[in-house]
Amino acid sequence: MSATHLVLIPSYNTGARLKETVLAALEVWSHVWLVVDGSDDGSDQGLEDLTVSYPNFRCLRKVANGGKGSAVLHACEIASEAGFSHALVMDADGQHPAASIQPLMHLSEAEPEAVVMGQPVFGPEVPKARLYGRRLTIFWTELETLRAGLGDTLFGMRVYPIKPLCHVMEATGFARGYDFDPEVAVRLVWEGVRPVQLKVPVRYFTEAEGGISHFQYVRDNVKLTFLHVRLMPLFAFFGFWRARQYKKIWKQKPKASTL
C-alpha cells in the first residue's frame, strides 16, 4: 500500500451513509482521512474509534462549515506536512465507489505529475436535471482549457498532486464551495498539470436509501455561472496561452488515459 497517497473524505451532515463510506474506503486503502466540515447532524460520532482497528485512519474536524474546497485544502496542507504527495478525494455519501480507489491510485502512481480525473458512468437512477445541467459547465471548462482532457469537471472523485492543488487554491479566495471541483481542474491545467481519465461508476441514492444532497438548483447554478464569468477573462489574458503551450508538451508524452 502506498505511503504517499491517501484518501480524503470531506463530510458535512452526510447522515447514516458516512460510516459505511469510510469503512468501505478503509477496506481497500490504508491511509484514509475523514474531514468533518462543521457537521452538526451527529453522523461523525464515534468514528474516531475506528483507529483501534485502522491505525492509519484519521478524523480531522473543522468547527465551522467552509465548503468542500475549504475542507480539502485544510486536509491537504496537513497531509503535505505529513509527507503525503497525492490525495484521492471522494464524496462521503456513497456515490463514489470504494472499488474505484485502487484503480485511480494506481494510475496516479504511474503518472505522479498528473491529476487523475474520474469520469462518471451514471446509472438510470440519476436525476435528469443533474445530468443535463452539468453539460453547460463541461462545455465551459472544455473551452477554458482548450479541450485539454478534463472531461466531466463536476465529478469530484479524482486524485490530486497535493502541492500543485494547494498552490492553485492559495492563489484564489474562491473554489471553496460547490465551485471547487471545476475551478481547480481548470486552474491545474493552466499550471501545467496534465489530466488523465478513468471511468468510475456512480450511484445516486434516494432519500429512502439514506441519500442526502446539499445541492440547491438556483444557488449553485448561479455560483457556477459566476465561476465562468470570473474564469473567462483570466483565460483570455493568460489561460489560453498556457493551455496551448502545455498541450503541445503533453502531446509528446505517451497517452496514459485508460478511459
Image (cartoon, helix red, strand yellow):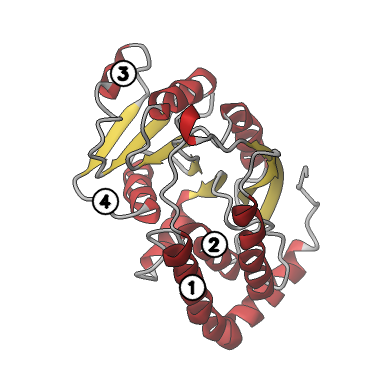
Q: Are marks 2 and 1 in contact (CB under 8 Å)?
A: yes
239 sits to left or right of 44: right
Circle 3 sits in a helix, a strand or a loop, which is it?
Answer: helix
Number of numbered discs present? 4
Measure the alpha-carbon separation of dots 3 and 4: 24 Å
First along the sequence among labels 3 and 2: 3
From the image, tell me which residue sits under label 2. Answer: 182
Q: Is residue 141 above or below residue 215?
A: below
Residue 8 is situated, as x and y percent measured from the top left of the image, at 43, 38
In the image, farthest residue toward the top: 53
Q: Quadrant of the C terminus?
A: top right
Residue 227, label in figure: 1
Measure the alpha-carbon separation of dots 3 and 2: 33 Å
Measure the alpha-carbon separation of dots 2 and 4: 20 Å
Circle 2 sits in a helix, a strand or a loop, which is it?
Answer: helix
The label nearer to you, 2 versus 4, is 4
Residue 65, label in figure: 4
Amino acid residing under circle 4: Asn
Q: How many residues crowd around disc 2 within 10 Å: few (fewer than 14), some, or many (20 or more)? A: many
Task: Report if residue 4 is visible in the image.
Answer: no
